[in-house]
Amino acid sequence: MAKKQQLWAWGIRNSFHYLVVLLVAVLLVAVVYLTGETGRLVEDYATCKSPAGDLSPPQCNFFSGKWVFDNKSYPLYKEQQCTFMSDQLACEKFGRKDMSYQNWRWQPHQCDLPRFNATALLERLRGKRLVFVGDSLNRGQWVSMVCLVDSAIPPTLKSMNSNGSLNIFKAIEYNATIEFYWAPLLVESNSDNPVNHRLPDRIVRVQAIEKHARHWTDADILVFNSYLWWRRPKMKVLWGSFESPDGIYKEVGMPRCYEMALKTWADWLEVHVNRNKTQLFFVSMSPIHER
């Protein structure tokens, strides 16, 4: 049995604008992936310089920093120029006037991050699957990642396909896919329908994950998130299947229910994920959508 894969986890502790959080999360995933063990970035940055211009230590803590306003090099893409922008995230399309939130970028204390390079990321993704799994937070990250690389790919060399809970963006020339799988609770639930999932009586099968997980098995990079859908005092747990009339239902406190679901998820990763191939990320607590 393989050892448990080390998970990258980060918590978002304040409620700064939701779309900015999405963008920095996507960029951090990209930066971590574009960074080798020696701390070098794929772009022509052999060393990482501090904001003052001095050489920093070989390793830079990307998670220690601050937000800075940058109206020269940001935003990285325009909403109306992204072929695959979702209406759920299209603020400008639906009347938002103040778009300055797009100009905030993350500045690590120890180094300067190179400007995002879509071609460099696509080269690293060549022949690979990057899969986001979770709720609308990860769906937003997926859309942002797709928009970040969209302009670097000719129209005839990219495609988008949806099959139930699985959405696949393919960069044909690179034989690479950036995917999103809807599983808001990670394990099976009655909220698994990617469209009709707003149900008043939420039911979860805390020990069942294979229905979802079989879609992720051979992914090279997995980015999980699950928290907002657990925010209620108690949840109804089902032992048995949704199709069986003999299923046993029991209300369980949210912390215990969440713990059981994450154990099922972690156990599946331990058995089925090849740690020599797959990189794992987990996005923890995050702000709600509303301002």
Image (tube, helix red, strand yellow):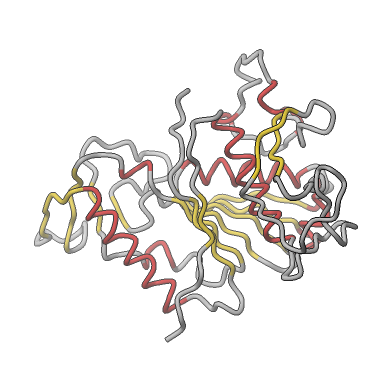
Left or right for 56, reference 168: right
Q: Position of residue 214 (x, y in %)?
A: 45, 68
Instruction: Tell me which residue sits at (72%, 37%) in the image.
Output: 83
In this view, the residue farthest toward the right is 44
- Name the foreground residue: 112 vs 101: 112
Q: Position of residue 213 (x, y in %)?
A: 43, 65
Instruction: Tell me which residue sits at (50%, 64%) in the image.
Output: 7
Q: Position of residue 51 (x, y in %)?
A: 81, 43
Left or right for 248, reference 112: left
Q: Quadrant of residue 264?
A: bottom left
Locate the N terminus by quadrant. Answer: bottom left
Instruction: Tell me which residue sits at (17%, 64%) in the image.
Output: 240
Is 215 drawn above or below residue 236 in the view shown? below
Count the marks. Answer: 0
Q: Position of residue 259 (x, y in %)?
A: 28, 58
Instruction: Tell me which residue sits at (54%, 52%) in the image.
Output: 180
In this view, the residue farthest toward the bottom is 1
Q: Quadrant of residue 246?
A: bottom left
Q: Quadrant of residue 57?
A: bottom right
Is 176 drawn above or below residue 27 in the view shown? below
